[in-house]
Amino acid sequence: MILGCIADDFTGATDLANTLTRGGMATVVLFGVPREDLAAPGADAIVIALKSRSIAAGDAVRQSLAALTWLQQAGPGPAPRESTAIPQIFFKYCSTFDSTDAGNIGPVAEALLAALGETFTIACPAFPTNKRTIYRGYLFVGDVLLSESSMRYHPLTPMTDALLTRVLQRQSKGRVGLIAYDVVERGAAAVREAMERLHAEGVRMAIVDALTDAHLVTIGAACARLKLLTGGSGLALGLPENFRRAGLLRARTGGALPAVHGHAAVIAGSCSAATQRQVAEMKRRSQWFEIDPIGLREDSASASKVLQWARPRLGREPILIYSTADPGAVEKAQAALGREQAGRLIETAMGEIAKGLVDMGVRQLVVAGGETSGAVASALGVEGLWIGEEIDPGVPWTFSLGEPPLALALKSGNFGTDDFFLKAFQKLEPPMNADGRFGE
């Protein structure tokens, strides 16, 4: 292993792993802090997927440090003396910088720096392919500021400030600086010089502007000697080439998954605008069941009723089970239940439903939403995933470690085209027949 990664949610972990796989790195995702004897032979990169984005900052720090300890024990090994790249640790968070004033990006990044004996790193959540860009420290979603996008309505981490230097400074003890667009435009050497200057001035973390994938490759090249990187999956675009130039990365082709035979389903818990559109599109063409969070509180058998509905419908086509709702409905549920209880009820139910579906023969499962994906993976007891073919930018199909074999697509709520759910199953071969079997 030459790159160890810590992701603050499950969909972000597969997003990052997808980027690394496309860059030629054999990559595996492990869920939660792995057990000591778990191994991933042949992996160039290991991504540990935590469920730490929305928990208390202290808990997020403890989990992240435990993940770091596991990665340090698993590798990476020493780089060749002449190497221009060193084995690295990557802390991955969302391209919309999902967090609160209490954390968890700043506290976790500073704790990892301290544990590694380092005093400087960068923060770059940009993902231009999915229209997340940074200019003069401001994060844009498409053509609007983050604070004017649908993220201002996020049920757990509403983002109401687009200036990332200010957001990160509120979470951090050390000074936060900026490496602006014009510096990045001048190339990797200019970015390295800016990092050295900021470090000398006492800056501990620097937001880095990026408007294009080429900027991210430049930033990655500039960071070849940093022990810790933090950012979105886009920042990983330039890392495989660093390791390749250093003689640390073997030539390989990857991404193909074995065929997985079984029924197909979608579980959607995200309330993002993108997932709302995807749910609406699939409802026009598939059978669906909507889950009401308030109803979950009043009926402890709701998950069983969903599974009773699902059983006779499996096999003809992928089915959809969702709690996705618009901001008004989310606000109503949170007012009735409280924000944390509403989230817990949905996650628990989705986990139970996923386990029941797998018991009934579902082997191809798309899950929308970071928190929902974490709950589903935990309920299924999935320890890890190998990364396969990309469906849409940032979302690959994956193949589970262990039994039963599962094809899983864990999608960040904000990612994917409107027809993502239906398109995902078309990527898998062989296709599903009308009787539910997979044939030629």
Image (cartoon, helix red, strand yellow):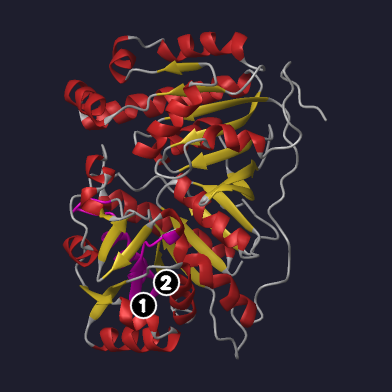
Q: CA distance from mark 1 to mark 2?
A: 8 Å
Visible residue check, residue 378? no
> Percent position (x, y) of residue 229?
41, 70
Residue at 65% from the left image edge and 43% from the top image edge: 399
* 388, above or below 155, in the image: below
Q: Which residue is mark 2?
A: 228
Range covered by the magenta-colored residues: 99-128
The number of numbered discs placed on residues in the rendered structure image is: 2
Q: Which secondary structure lies at badge 2?
A: strand
The amino acid type of the residue labelled 1 equals Glu
Picture quadrant of residue 300: top left
Picture quadrant of residue 173: bottom left
For the C terminus, the quadrant is top right
- Which of the two residues, 60 or 155, is positioned nearer the viewer here? 155
Visible residue check, residue 394? yes
Which label number is shown at residue 118?
A: 1
- Front label number (1 vs 2): 2
* Callout 1 touching callout 2 (CB < 8 Å): yes
The amino acid type of the residue labelled 2 equals Leu
